[in-house]
Image: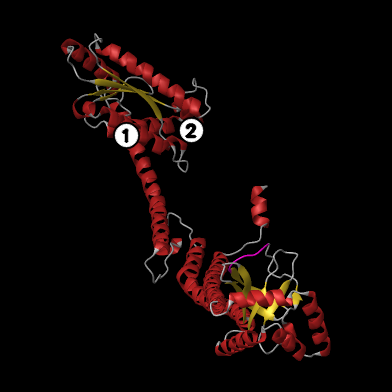
Amino acid sequence: MQENSTKDRKRISIGRRVYCFIAVVVFVATFGASMIAYKVHIGQIDTYYKNLSLNTAINFASFVDGDYLNSLCKAISTEEYNNLRDTAEETDNEDMIRDYLIAQGLWDQYDSTRSFLIQYLRNMKDIKYLYIMRLGESISDEDIYLIDDDDNPLYITGTKEADNLGLDGPTGIVPPSISNTDWGWLCSAYAPVYDSKGSLVCHVGCDISMDEVMASRTKALLLDVLGSAVFTLLVTLIAIHYTKHTVIKPLNKITAGLGHFSPSPDVDYEKAGVIDINLRNNDEISDIYHAIQSNQKRIVDYIKDIVVIQKEKEIAENETKLKEKEIGEISKDAYLDALTHVGSKIAYSKKIAEMNENINPGAAFAVIMVDVNFLKTINDNHGHAAGDTYLSGCCNIVCDIFKHSPVYRVGGDEFLVILTGSDYRNRHERIRQLQDAFDKSYNQTDVDPWLRYSAAFGMAEFSSDDDNVESVCDRADKEMYREKARFKQSLGIDPETR
C-alpha cells in the first residue's frame, strides 16, 4: 500500500523544489528586511513629528500669560458671553466679540496674544494649527477654544467641541499622537499653561499635517513590495541558472549513467556501462560520482574474480581428488587429514599426550573447538563434493586466522586449535577476527550455499584447576555448543539441525 501510494504521488523534481525554496527564502528575506527598514524609518519620522509638535506646544506655552488666560476662561464661561457668541456666529459679526472683550478689559492682551500666535504659526512652516483651548475636566465635558489663528473668526473663542482626547480630569502634558481626523492626518500635542499660583488653566495645542507623510508611506510600501518581488525574480533567475549547471545537470547525468550499468563476466568497464562523465566542479556531487564509479568498477572486478575463483576451485577440487586416490588408505593413518591437510585425529591424540606429560600449573595455552554448521544440509542438498568444499573452506578460514597454532580435524565436522605463543597472547582479538571472517562469508547471499562458510566455536583457557588438556577441551566443547545453539536460534533454526 505504501509503495503504491508513493507511485501515485505527483513527482516533483529536486530542481523545482530548490527553485521554489530559493524564491521563497529570497522574497521573505528581502521583504522582511524592507519591512524592518520601513518600520524603523516611519518610527523615526513619527518620533520627529511628535517631538516637533510637543516642543512647539511647550515652547509657545512658555510665552503666554496663564493669569490672563484664567481671566479669559472665566469671562467666556458666562451665560451672557455664550448667548453673545451664538448671535455673533449666526450673524458672522466679529465686532460683537471684540466689543465684549474690550468691555471686560481683556481685548488688548487677547489681541497681542493672538497676533503673537499668528506670527509664531507663520514662522513655523511645518505647523498646520496652533491654538489655545481648555480641555474638559472629565471625558463627558466639552473642550473650549480660547484663542485661535486668523483663519478662524473671533467667535471661535468659547466654541465647544466634544472631547476627542479621552482624558478623564485635568492633566499636564498630553503625549503626542498621530490620528486620522476630519482635518486629515494630524500629529497633535498639548502643553499645559499654569497661572501664577501653579494651577492648570488651559493647554496650547499644536497640530502638524501628516497627509503628505502618510501618502509617501503608502507609496514607499508599494515600492518595497514591488522591489522585493523584482529583486526576488532576479536572484531566483541567477540561482536557477547557477543551480541548474552546478547541481541539477550533474545529478541528471549521474542518474542517466546509472541506468546504463549492466555488468557481466566477459565485458570491460566501458561495455559494462561504468559511469563516465565530465564534472567541472570538485564538490560533494563530484564525490558521489567518484564513489558510484568506484563501486561500479569493483562490481565488475568482483564478477570477474568470482569466475576466476570458481575455475580455480574446480581445478583445485580435481587435484584434490587425484591426490586422494593416490594417497588411498595410507592417508587414514597419516598425521595429516586427507581432505583439509590439517592435523589428523592421530596427530591430535599424540599432541595431547605430549602436553599432558609436560603440563604444569604455569602452562599458558588455550583450546578452541570449532564445529562446522550446516554440513549435513550441504551434503544432502548439494552432494558430498560440495560438502567437502564447504568443510575445506571452513578449515581454511580457521587456519588463516590461527597461522601460528596447530589445527586438528578431530571429527567429521569438528576441528580443534591449540593456541600458544602470539596466538594465545592475542586470543581475544583472534576470536573476534574468526567471528568476523565467518560472518562475512555467511552473509554472501550471492554465492553458492557451499561457499557461505559458517561454524560455531568456543574457547577455554588452561587454568590451575585443570589437571590435563582434556578438561580444557571439554570446557571449550561446551562453550562451542552454547554458541552453536545461540546462532541457530538467532536464525530460527532447530538447534539440533546439522
Q: Which mark is residue 366?
A: none
Work out whether mark 2 precedes mark 1 in sequence or the reverse, and give the earlier one: 2
Instruction: Determine the residue positioned at 62% across, 78% down.
Output: 68
Q: For label 2, count other residues whose C-alpha is less than 10 Å away and answer few (under 14), some (14-19) or many (20+).
A: some
- The x, y position of residue 406, in whole percent, is 24, 25
Disc 1 residue type (three-letter): Gln
Viewer-nearest residue: 46 or 5: 46
Query: What's the distance in space between the residues labelled 2 and 1, CA to CA?
Result: 29 Å
Q: Nearer the viewer, residue 28 or 322?
A: 28
Q: Could you tell me if the residues under marks 2 and 1 are in contact, i.e. CB atoms within 8 Å?
A: no
- Residue 154 sits above or below residue 389 on the image: below
At horizontal 61% and vertical 63% (from top left) the residue drawn is 12
Which residue carries the number 1 mark?
Answer: 433
Neighbourhood count class around disc 1 (C-alpha, 10 Å): few under 14, some 14–19, many 20 upward: some
Q: Looking at numbered disc 2 in the image, what kind of residue is underneath it? A: His
Percent x, y for residue 317? 36, 37
Foreground of the two, 428 or 219:
219
Relative to residue 404, is residue 462 depicted above or below? above
Q: Taken as a whole, is the magenta stretch helix, strand or loop?
A: loop
Q: Nearer the viewer, residue 254 or 64?
A: 64
Q: Dot 1: what SS?
A: helix
Magenta span has 16?
Answer: no
State whether residue 267 appears in this view.
no
The residue lying at 59 percent from left, 80 percent from top is 220
Question: In the structure shown, which secondary structural element does the residue marked by tag 2 occupy?
Answer: helix
Tell me the magenta residue range.
Answer: 169-173
Tell whether 497 sits left or right of 142: left
* Disc 2: which residue: 382
